[in-house]
C-alpha cells in the first residue's frame, strides 16, 4: 500500500502498471488490497535484494527485471511459494539468481548475518 500513498515512488506510475491501477479502480468489485513494490523504478546499485513475504513472486520478478544479481526470497507459506514457482508468467523462481527460503520473516532476520 505504500506506493499507493506515494512513499517510495520517484515518478508517476505509467504504462502497464498505471493501466492496472486504473482497471482496479474502475472495477465494480471490492478491492481489499493492492501492493506495488516499493522503489519499483529504482536501480539496484547493491545488486543483492531481499524480498520478505515473496508470495507468488511479483517482487522477485521486479527485482530481476531491474538488474538484481542475487535475490533472496523469504516466504512463510510453502504452498504459496509452490504456486508461484509453477504459475508465475515470468518464472522468477527458476532463475539461478534467486534463492528461496521458507521461514517466518522475524525468524529469518534473527538467523541471518547477510547484508542487503
Image (cartoon, grey):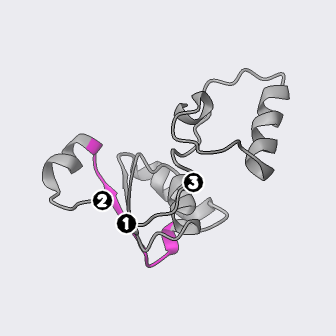
User: What residue do we see at 78% from left, 23% from top?
Assistant: 29
Q: Give the labeled residue for mark 3.
A: 58
The percent coordinates of residue 52 (x first, y second) are 38, 48
Q: Which residue is mark 2?
A: 116
Label 1 Cα crowd, 10 Å radius (few <14 / some 14-19 / many 20+): few
* Circles 3 and 1: CB atoms closer than 8 Å: no
Q: How many marks?
A: 3
Of 104 and 37, the residue lying toward us: 37
Residue beneath disc 1: 46
Q: The C terminus lies in which quarter of the figure?
A: bottom left
Tag nearer the camera, 1 or 2: 1
What is the quadrant of residue 83 in the picture? Answer: bottom right
Q: From mark 3 to mark 1, how far is it between C-alphas? A: 20 Å
Residue 108, how many percent across, how many down? 22, 50
Range shown magenta: 93-105
Q: Residue at x 81, y 43 (%)?
A: 19
Image vertical order of residue 41 relative to residue 64, above or below:
above
Are the residues tagged 1 and 2 within 8 Å (C-beta)? yes
Is residue 79 within the magenta segment?
Answer: no
- List x then y, in percent, for residue 90: 64, 66
Which quadrant is the N terminus positioned in? top right
Disc 3 versus disc 1: nearer the observer: 1
On the image, the x and y values in percent for residue 54 come to 45, 51
- Sequence-earlier tag: 2 or 3: 3
Amino acid at each position: 500500500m505504500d506506493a499507493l500513498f506515494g512513499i517510495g515512488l520517484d515518478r508517476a506510475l505509467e504504462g502497464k502498471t498505471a493501466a492496472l491501477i486504473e482497471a482496479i479502480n474502475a472495477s465494480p468489485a471490492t478491492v481489499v488490497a493492492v501492493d506495488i513494490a516499493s522503489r519499483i523504478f529504482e536501480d539496484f546499485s547493491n545488486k543483492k535484494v531481499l524480498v520478505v513475504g515473496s508470495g507468488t513472486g511479483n517482487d522477485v520478478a521486479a527485482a530481476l527485471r531491474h538488474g538484481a544479481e542475487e535475490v533472496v526470497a523469504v516466504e512463510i507459506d510453502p504452498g504459496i511459494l509452490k504456486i508461484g514457482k509453477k504459475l508465475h508468467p515470468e518464472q522468477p523462481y527458476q532463475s539461478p539468481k534467486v534463492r528461496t527460503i521458507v521461514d517466518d520473516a522475524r525468524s529469518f532476520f534473527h538467523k541471518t548475518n547477510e547484508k542487503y
